[in-house]
């Protein structure tokens, strides 16, 4: 989408876009430029203030994706946001969390903009066969019977063509999906609220609810896939399991591959 939202993001406008009930619960901070919004929150490790803290930046100079990739984060264009959250219990309570967050974002974008996104295992948001956003969940560790996490998401909103030219893989943005520039403040409020509400539900019932959303939006379902490994695993993607692992029907039978274990090398067309 050509053209940029000339307004710098501001906290007051994001907070006004939140439901009233969440305005006291979430602590929203908006920066002009940071290295990475995830890193800003990682510095709150061990502090009670991490829970419910929301950091949004207009620009990131060290935006990070999964597997050490760079996240293209130009100023005045997109949404770069991280939320701190603390869950009670052992590490297992986080099973499926990063996939669930993708589903929360996709559902909220459908409600807010009417755009149907697909979820590409494990953490990508797709539209029209192109990547539009991604989720980066970082676990800070076990603190007195609980798990603290930083949940980062990046959405291409009104990405200038010249900035997007540096992205190696096919990409798109929400402006292209709706055919008009998208208001980033309203979008930020809607998505942050959707995640906060979704996380409260996740704390109660885990991945189960979001599993159904995943099935409905699963980009890989029915496609041939090849995952790295020794030897590489190839087969037909047939959904995710209760833990968020990718299920692949391979020559050796059905295998479940956890997100941290392997990455996709090839994807074929949907059959
Ligand atoms: C991916 O698709 O690889 C995940 C991308 C996550 C990008 C977001 S932007 C906000 C937050 N800060 C970062 O440095 N990364 C995440």
Image: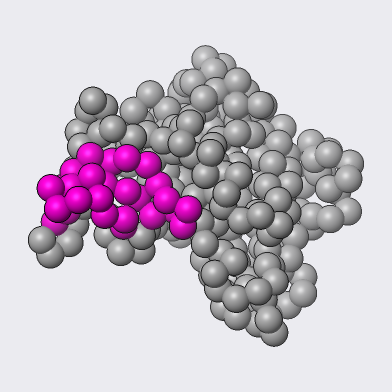
> In this picture, is 54 found above or below 79?
below
Counting from the top left corner in percent of width and height, residue 144 is at 69, 84
Q: Which image quarter: residue 238?
A: top left
Counting from the top left corner in percent of width and height, residue 261 is at 30, 64
Counting from the top left corner in percent of width and height, residue 124 is at 42, 43
> In this picture, is 89 found above or below 107?
below
Residue under the point 19% across and 57% down: 228
Relative placement, left or right, of 11 versus 137 is: right
Residue 153 visible in image: no
Q: In front here: 30 or 38?
A: 38
The extreme top residue here reads: 179
- Disc tally is 0
Coloring applied to the structure: one colour
Residue under the point 42% across and 28% down: 127
Residue under the point 59% across and 71% down: 42
Residue range in magenta is 232-257
């Amino acid at each position: 989408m050509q053209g940029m939202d000339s307004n710098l993001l501001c906290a007051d406008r994001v907070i006004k876009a939140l439901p009233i009930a969440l305005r006291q619960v979430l602590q929203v901070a908006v920066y002009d430029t940071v290295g990475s919004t995830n890193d800003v929150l990682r510095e709150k490790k061990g502090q009670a203030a991490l829970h419910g803290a929301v950091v949004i930046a207009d620009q990131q100079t060290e935006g990070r994706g999964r597997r050490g990739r760079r996240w293209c984060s130009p100023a005045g264009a997109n949404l770069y946001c991280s939320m701190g959250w603390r869950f009670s219990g052992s590490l297992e309570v986080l099973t499926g969390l990063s996939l669930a967050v993708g589903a929360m974002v996709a559902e909220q974008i459908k409600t807010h903009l009417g755009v149907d996104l697909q979820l590409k295992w494990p953490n990508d948001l797709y539209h029209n066969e192109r990547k539009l956003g991604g989720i980066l969940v970082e676990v800070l560790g076990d603190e007195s019977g609980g798990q603290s996490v930083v949940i980062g998401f990046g959405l291409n909103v009104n990405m200038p063509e010249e900035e997007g030219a540096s992205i190696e893989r096919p990409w798109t943005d929400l402006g292209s999906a709706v055919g008009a520039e998208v208001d980033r403040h309203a979008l930020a409020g809607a998505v942050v609220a959707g995640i906060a509400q979704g996380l409260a539900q996740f704390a109660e019932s885990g991945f189960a609810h979001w599993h159904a959303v995943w099935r409905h939006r699963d980009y890989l379902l029915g496609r041939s896939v090849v995952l790295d490994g020794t030897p590489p695993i190839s087969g037909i993607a047939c959904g995710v399991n209760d833990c968020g692992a990718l299920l692949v029907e391979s020559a050796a039978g059905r295998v479940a591959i956890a997100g941290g274990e392997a990455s996709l090398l090839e994807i074929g067309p949907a059959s």
